[in-house]
Amino acid sequence: MRTAARLIARAFWIFLGLYAAALAIFVIFTFGLFGQDKVPLAGIFLILLGVPWVQLGGVPDAVGPWFAVIAPVGNLAPLAWAALFARRMA
């Protein structure tokens, strides 16, 4: 059981790192920070990390980019819960 707890915790930290990197890429390339060109596809990695939630219909276009920023949290929360539950059971 300890191995499963470690594996789930490792998956949580890897996903959190990927989310932080994708968020940084989104901010840098959307607003043109550090002299970078503005790229229209800057949020593609956030969309990939939040896949089941981003595909929900009914999100207005004005809220779309902000929804893409928040969507990976919908995948991160169950991972955090599973890591906490696995640690308690170990």
Image (spheres, helix red, strand yellow):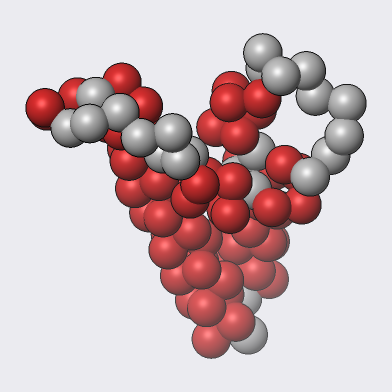
Image position of 56 with respect to 12: above or below: above
Query: Residue at point 33% right, 41% down?
Result: 25
Residue 76 location, x and y as percent?
60, 49
User: Is 50 on the left or on the right of 28, as rendered?
Assistant: right
Please name whichever residue, 36 or 48, is drawn nearer the observer in this view of the structure.
Answer: 36
User: Is 83 on the left or on the right of 85, as rendered?
Assistant: left
Query: Residue at point 12% right, 28% down?
Result: 34
Query: Residue at point 68% right, 61% down?
Result: 82
Please name whichever residue, 38 or 75, is drawn nearer the observer in this view of the structure.
Answer: 38
Image quarter of the N terminus? bottom right
Image position of 38 with respect to 9: above or below: above
Answer whether residue 38 is visible to the viewer in this image: yes
Q: Quadrant of residue 38?
A: top left
Q: Residue furthest left?
A: 35
Image quarter of the C terminus? bottom right
Residue 58 location, x and y as percent?
88, 26
Query: Residue at point 87% right, 34% down?
Result: 57
Image position of 32 with respect to 15: above or below: above
Q: Residue furthest right?
A: 58
Answer whether residue 70 is visible to the viewer in this image: no
Residue 59 location, x and y as percent?
80, 24
- Total marks drawn? 0
Q: Residue furthest top?
A: 62
Please name whichever residue, 50 or 28, is drawn nearer the observer in this view of the structure.
Answer: 28
Image position of 78 with respect to 57: above or below: below
